[in-house]
Image: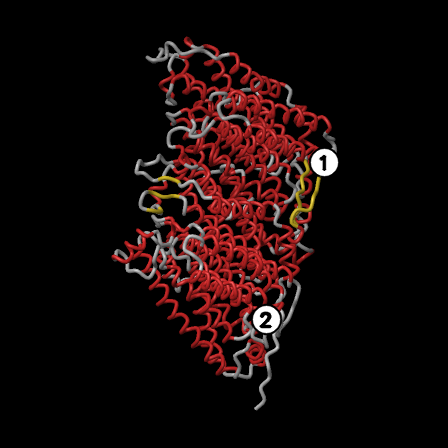
Amino acid sequence: MKWLTLLMFLPLVGAAVVSVLPKANEKAAKQAALVTTIAVLLVTVAMTLNFERENVGLQFVEKYAWIPSFGINFAVGLDAIALVLILMSTILAPIVVLAGWNEAHGGRWSVKTFYILILVLETMMIGVFAATDLFLFYVIFEAMLIPVYFLIGGFGTGERAAAAVKFLIYSLVGGLLMLASIIALFVMSGDQFGHTFDINELSQLQMSSTTQNLLFLGFFIAFAIKAPVWPFHTWLPDAAASASPGTSVLLLGVLDKVGTFGMIRYCLTLFPEASKTFTPLILILAVISILYGAFLAIGQKDIKRLIAYTSISHFGFITLGIFAMTTQGHSGAVLYMFNHAFSTAALFLVAGWMISRRGSSTISDFGGLQRVTPVLAWSFFFAGLSSLALPGLSSFVSEFLVLVGTFTRYPVHAIIATFGIVLAALYILIPVQKALHGPTTPGNENLKDLNLREKIAIAPVAAIIVFLGFYPSPLLKIINPATTNIIAQLGFTDPAPSIEDK
Amino acid sequence: MTFTSPVLSYTLLSPMLILLGGALLGVVVEAFVSRAKRPTVQLTLALGVLFLALFQVWNIRGEQSLTPAMGSIIIDGPAVLLQGTILIISIIAILLIADTEHFTALPAALPGSEEERKAIAMGAQVTEVYPLTLFAVAGMLMFPVAGDLITLFVALEMLSLPLYLMAGLSRRRRLASQESALKYFLLGSFSSAFFLFGVAYLYGYSGSVDFAGIQKSVVGGSGNDVLLLIGIAFLSIGLLFKVGAVPFHSWAPDVYQGAPTPVTAFMAAATKVAAFGAMLRIYYTVFANAQWSWSPMLTGIAVITMLLGSLVAVTQRDVKRMLAYSSIAHAGFLLLGVIALNKSGLDSTIFYLFAYGVATVGAFAVVTLVRDSSGEVTDLNRWKGLGKRSPFAASTFAFFLLAFAGIPLTSGFIGKFSIFSAAYESGATGLVLVAILSSALAAFFYIRVIVLMFFSEATEDGTSVEIPSILTRTAIVASAAITLILGVYPTPLLDFISDLAIFIR
């Protein structure tokens, strides 16, 4: 069965259905989008159950000739990492649709347009993780900017046009750097064994270390902009602050993961030597991201910008885990990507509800919500705890794995990164204290608590966060064989934990 | 002295002959058919002639001959591809030209004169633009298939002279239009003179004006290299002027702005195909063995063309001028394919020409739709909020801009990818990096226009979007469809080009 094509084309079918619905019937568009995303989720779950955990090769492989004269194929396939990320994306999609039921109303265009963009974006999110042909990956990597651009610019708030442009320009510049590297790989493959974009074949390319370093940089900078890693992060706070909460969830939860996913799938596989050469530098950038994001988060007055900066800190952890080059580090990083999506989703969705109720996104405007809207306030508190990696919640497991994995090889980096956790407690607890506790800020007295739809939307997120906090092994069992394989292929062995003789 | 009668292969020459015959017939129609029927008859004639020529081009695909006209014309795979491209672009462009709203009633009358007023009052509408277009197309068809320098020069003049006239035909802002025509004419004549000068030097170098003879001298290396270098330089000036490469570009923004928009569309797309077609033939065959004489020069020109085109476009406030600078930048990208001097360079340049040409006609077609009471509105500030007033116009224009920017799933991306990789393959790594840098710059101003159309609030100033006539709509939809299809599934066309594109020498 053509699982992956089915999965990729389902949302497109949904988009087509939405596009023919009458413009006035907004409810039908929402329902169609919800049904589609749930159907996609069910297919993904079925695929996850059929996934062979011990098989480290690609599964669900499909390959069709696309542009044979350039050796380009429409080739898709899943390894464990891609599967986990697709699962993450397809779980988030219906939640975003449900949580943002009324999000599209403030937009420049019709509600229909909003859901068409979301569904098209879902196809691309699946495709970008599933692609095993570099050209296909690049096409989707770039093309998915367009729906996001229109989602931010069309349905965002505040300085949405400027934020959308900033996002697009940053991403396009990164993409063009990557294109330069891709062209070089393409031409070299033509010289060495015939034009191809198959990543397995491309990883066999012979190249000098200078070439490898340059091409690695082309890819890495593109992914670092996407992720975003300090100092390529400046577009993110603006984009996240202007986008609607649902778009922000997809932007930070899924799209930014393409950056860290790309580091594993493309940087490490295609340029193993260059990855090792640049590891010290990248680790420093990662540690700076962790601390810088956390410090700036503490100072934010706007709740959406705060969440954006916490994400920069979290992406620092993910990058650290990837380039620590240990099995725990890698497994932790992949698990982190999954968990971060849900803790950020919880934060953004709850913050979105707070903002739409209060009509402001300034943290100090939310004083006393605990008394007025207890469920809302507790949800925010819970999301915050998940973000600061409280033991028992899912983020703790991944953060711990990343730090352990890093410590065995780079103890200094790990120790400095640990301060990020302390700062996390500050940047979460200070706004929680300001916003939820304390005297009720005038204007908040009559706010309504979460309605049933919102509770249904946030419940699965909370459930996943708690469940994976106590019992992460279902996911880790899928992830571990793949990460062990990658580390072994890179020629690393995990340093054995040792107790120094005193 | 004996006179040898010329041996002509009429089948291979038929596309050009059909065009010339059709153009002459058009002149007769202009003189004898009643005024009321003239526009319809002319349009039908022009379309019929273009389709017939395209049909003939299709029939002669795969034919190869060095002597269809005693060596003056060379028909081979690239010739067929380029002629087909020019004809397809012309067919789409003629649909725009058919909107007589853009053309002055009586071009011979002075702007603002009594005569002009009378002509307008009478409802007179001369339709000489059709035969002029057909003559220009005939010249364009001949330009990339010329087999000697004299034929090349004749073709150059044949395509240029009608265009000079057509640039001055605008109904609105006639003085600006005529000024642009004059500017185009003066600078064009100047570049033709350079071109002819180059021909003379090449004759002095090789003792021959046909390509085969010059090529033999280049390969043999017997002649005086100074003459060759001067000849190449001057010939190149003539060709680079036509494609609007920096520093021979200064006519482009003014002429693009002043000319009636349908003419701009035709000129921007088709001339570029013809001129690059000729450049490909000359550099890939005649001067191929003197690569080191011209490659550094073209590299320099490509670099400044790409950078200047993209940089200056950022500052433009007029949509037609912006498209002019964007077309200059694209000329720079296309030069990469010429410099590559390999099979993939040839294939990708032809693909790029087709993709870019079609998207250009489409983009200008949208420009013709945005008007106010005094004609077209090309001031970008007044395009604000277009997305709300006309989603059709704004979204198709945005799509063409994305194609120009080379975003995946448009033909522009496939074109850019293939031409950049061809250049990289030839070892021009630095050039590819400059091209990528300019693409990033260029993306900025394309996006700026999209922002204006979709994300800025409209200013209330009476700008309206015309309901497109059925012909204009066909032109826009056809261009958009081709741009999308070539972006999603370019394989058939790429394979077709790759099978055919081999020069015979």
- Quadrant in the picture for the C terminus of chain B: bottom right
**Mark 1 highlights which residue?**
A59
Residue closest to the eye, B104 or B183: B104
Residue closest to the eye, B144 or A205: B144
- Protein chain holding label 2: B
Residue A196 rendering spot, x and y as whole percentages: 66, 51
- Protein chain holding label 1: A
Q: Do marks 1 and 2 share a subunit?
A: no
- Quadrant in the picture for the N terminus of chain B: bottom right
Whether residue B489 is situated above or below residue A473 in the rendered picture: below
Q: Which mark is residue A76?
A: none
Amino acid on which the number 2 mark rests in the picture: Ile
Q: Classify mark 1: helix, strand or loop.
A: strand
The single residue placed furthest to the bottom in the displayed view is B1
Which colour assignment does the render follow? secondary structure
Amino acid on which the number 1 mark rests in the picture: Gln
Residue closest to the eye, A489 or B240: B240
Cα–Cα span, label 1 and label 2: 53 Å
Q: Residue at x 58, y 48 (%)?
A: B486
Residue A312 rendering spot, x and y as whole percentages: 48, 32
Please state if A125 lies on the left or on the right of B324 as rendered: right
Residue B428 in view: yes
Residue A501 in view: no
Residue closest to the eye, B70 or A435: B70
**Mark 2 highlights which residue?**
B74
